[in-house]
């Protein structure tokens, strides 16, 4: 009979002393707590009764629990759903466009046999060193491309950037050996097929990382909406939250048909609705967070800028 | 030239693949660079579109720059931008490396993972969301900070109307959002260090502090230098969201919260003086460009392998 042998616990002679371990745990723990605390606080506020809140201010434990803010949003929150839809569309479409542009360009840069790869690397890299600035960008987007008040204004200006390309190029170079591409060529595979059926599947972890960076960029973007979007039906989530910072009317504009706007405005649980909207806008990110983090950490170790 | 056509023929597919990205760079990066000439013009919109507007506007030489630098604003925004960046870069570097080393040393690895996960969280949120977070603390009548102050018998502070606190608030928030990310970068680098260095050092009787000082830090140096050069290159640029969203665009605070980026946005959207805003942007780009080149060549002189190009 096999005797259950307990492995002696490994002793790490190089570990820090228990005293320092406790001290450092406390210091780092407190800081880590401040990083998640505000989110919990905002959730607590969103479940507080508006009248109690007006009296006591924001508090961590609601004196009177209330779902009124969420009820209000689900009854009259057409704008919220509309904005959710805009953000979702922009994020999905944008990520696909970004990945198409980034992988194709980066792949060409990774091919050592391509004569002009240094030229195109510099063409991309130079944009990291020098930029035209906000105003010429704005003029090009509105006067030349006529993107004002279109969904493309939320996608195209941030569809690519040189940093992602350089990271992706390094990833292709390290994960796809030249010999593999040569072998595919000898076996009669065309360049395009090699890229689609051999290079892309091998590079999936790198593509996933860049894809997540892009997804996050689109989901969290409000700056393009600030510059280019005025039409309420095209306002994405983050920009909507920005607009309700000072007036809630924006949210109820679209619900006016339902009744007198005065009536709604009078019963409007302003502060709690704001915070409830913040919670609803953050929830998808918070839920996807563990998944995101895994790839981010992986991706950080993948691409070093230097060749 | 014949080499070019030969390549075009031989690598048809590769040329085809590089094309969409090239067009994007041309339109969204190089065309605006051409557009910066309106910094030297009195920009008027022409009905025949972008090129007609840029080319038909009247040359005014350096008038836009004179106008920009004649105001006190140019000094204030330059000072704010540089000082905030110096604080964010130096504090960010020290804290990121410090936190990475600490996380690596904690005995309970599971707790270290939990801390790291929590600290990474703010990186995933937008500045708009975070501005609601800060508001829940700083709101004059409802905020938790004023509740605490009043509880201890103090007078409530008008946070969004008092310039004294904002340098600290902005630096804290800037670090708070990015530290999780940057410390993970260093943590990954520490994880890549060969363990046998530490074992050898331990056998030779090196203390923990000596191990950090003589093994960890020197091995992290190349990464620290590279990231710092990149950051110094961007010393004339700031995170627009931090300086625009967190102070909630409060006019009273402009003297301590206005940076070059927010100044350009505000002068573009409120006064509509496009020539002058472009001049401010060009000033930012040119000085930023010089900063990267200079820092990089200095680093190249000191230790060639640490330079980025």
Image (spheres, rainbow, N blue to C red):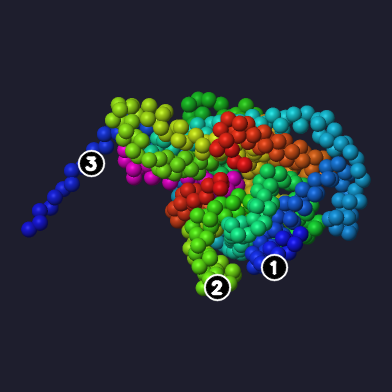
The picture quadrant where one finds residue A89 is bottom right
- Relative side of B129 to A224, left or right: left
Q: Which chain carries label 1?
A: B
Residue at 16%, 48% in the rendered image: A6
Q: Name the residue under label 3.
A: A10
Q: Is residue B205 above or below residue A261?
A: above
Number of numbered tags placed on the structure image: 3
Q: In which quarter of the image is the N terminus of chain B?
A: bottom right
In whole angstroms, how far apart are the C-alphas of marks 2 and 3?
A: 53 Å
Residue at 47%, 36% in the rendered image: B220
Q: Residue B121 lies in magenta, yes or no?
A: yes
Q: What stretch is highlighted in magenta?
A: B107-129
- Relative side of B4 to B276, left or right: left
Camera-side residue of B295 and A190: A190
Q: Quadrant of the C terminus of chain B?
A: top right
Closer mark to the observer between disc 1 and disc 3: 1
Q: Name the residue under label 2.
A: A189
Q: Residue A163 lies in magenta, yes or no?
A: no
Residue A7 percent coordinates (x, y): 18, 46
Q: Which chain carries label 2?
A: A
The picture quadrant where one finds residue B86 is top right
Q: Element under label 1? A: helix
In whole angstroms, how far apart are the C-alphas of marks 1 and 3?
A: 63 Å
Q: Element under label 3? A: loop
Number of residues whose C-alpha sits closer than 10 Å to that of mark 2, classed few (under 14), some (14–19) or many (20 or more): some
Mark 2 in CB contact with mark 1 (< 8 angstroms): no
Number of residues whose C-alpha sits closer than 10 Å to that of mark 3, classed few (under 14), some (14–19) or many (20 or more): few
Residue B266 percent coordinates (x, y): 75, 42
Residue that protrudes farthest toward the left in the picture: A1
**Mark closer to the chain start, 2 or 3:** 3
Camera-side residue of B194 and A74: B194
Q: Mark 1 points at which residue?
A: B9
């Amino acid at each position: 009979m096999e005797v259950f042998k307990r492995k002696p616990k490994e002793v790490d002679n190089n570990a820090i002393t228990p005293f320092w371990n406790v001290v450092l745990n406390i210091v780092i723990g407190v800081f880590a707590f401040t990083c998640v605390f505000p989110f919990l606080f905002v959730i607590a506020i969103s479940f507080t009764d508006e009248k109690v809140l007006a009296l006591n201010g924001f508090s961590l434990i609601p004196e009177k629990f209330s779902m009124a803010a969420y009820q209000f949003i689900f009854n009259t929150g057409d704008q919220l759903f509309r904005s959710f839809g805009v953000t979702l569309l922009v994020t999905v479409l944008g990520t696909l466009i970004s990945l198409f542009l980034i992988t194709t360009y980066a792949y060409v840069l990774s091919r050592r046999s391509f004569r002009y790869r240094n030229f195109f690397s510099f063409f991309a890299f130079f944009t990291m060193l020098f930029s035209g600035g906000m105003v010429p960008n704005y003029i090009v987007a509105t006067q030349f491309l006529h993107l004002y008040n279109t969904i493309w204004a939320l996608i195209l200006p941030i569809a690519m950037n040189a940093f992602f390309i350089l990271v992706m190029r390094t990833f292709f170079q390290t994960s796809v050996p030249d010999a593999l591409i040569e072998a595919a060529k000898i076996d009669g595979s065309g360049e395009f097929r090699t890229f689609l059926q051999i290079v892309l599947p091998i590079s999936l972890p790198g593509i996933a990382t860049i894809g997540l960076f892009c997804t996050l960029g689109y989901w969290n973007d409000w700056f393009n909406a600030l510059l280019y979007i005025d039409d309420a039906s095209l306002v994405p989530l983050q920009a909507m939250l920005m607009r309700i910072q000072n007036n809630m009317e924006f949210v109820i504009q679209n619900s006016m048909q339902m009744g007198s706007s005065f009536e709604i405005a009078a019963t409007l649980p302003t502060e709690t609705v704001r915070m409830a909207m913040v919670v609803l806008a953050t929830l998808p990110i918070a839920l996807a967070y563990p998944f995101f983090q895994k790839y981010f950490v992986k991706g950080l170790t993948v691409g070093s800028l230097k060749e | 030239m014949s080499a070019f056509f030969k390549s075009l023929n031989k690598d048809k597919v590769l040329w085809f693949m590089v094309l969409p990205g090239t067009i994007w760079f041309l339109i969204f990066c190089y065309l605006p660079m051409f557009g910066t000439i309106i910094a030297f013009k009195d920009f008027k919109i022409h009905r025949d579109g972008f090129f007609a507007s840029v080319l038909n506007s009247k040359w005014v030489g350096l008038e836009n720059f004179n106008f920009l630098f004649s105001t006190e604003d140019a000094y204030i925004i330059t000072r704010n931008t540089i000082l905030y960046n110096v604080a964010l870069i130096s504090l960010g570097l020290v804290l990121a490396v410090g936190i990475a080393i600490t996380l690596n040393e904690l005995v309970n690895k599971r707790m270290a993972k939990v801390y790291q996960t929590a600290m990474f969280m703010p990186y995933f949120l937008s500045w708009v969301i975070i501005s609601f977070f800060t508001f829940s603390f700083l709101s004059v009548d409802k905020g938790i900070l004023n509740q605490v102050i009043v509880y201890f018998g103090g007078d409530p502070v008008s946070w969004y109307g008092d310039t004294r606190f904002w340098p600290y608030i902005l630096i804290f928030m800037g670090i708070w959002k990015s530290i999780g990310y940057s410390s993970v970068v260093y943590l990954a680098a520490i994880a890549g260090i060969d363990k046998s260095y530490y074992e050898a050092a331990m056998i030779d009787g090196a203390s923990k502090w000596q191990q950090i000082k003589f093994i960890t830090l020197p091995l992290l140096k190349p990464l620290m230098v590279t990231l710092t050069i990149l950051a110094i290159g961007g010393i004339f640029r700031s995170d627009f969201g931090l300086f625009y969203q967190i102070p909630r665009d409060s006019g009273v605070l402009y003297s301590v919260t206005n940076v070059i980026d927010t100044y350009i946005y505000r002068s573009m959207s409120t006064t509509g003086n496009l020539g002058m805003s472009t001049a401010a942007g060009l000033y930012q780009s040119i000085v930023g460009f010089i900063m990267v080149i200079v820092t990089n060549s200095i680093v190249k002189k000191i230790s060639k392998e640490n330079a980025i190009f």
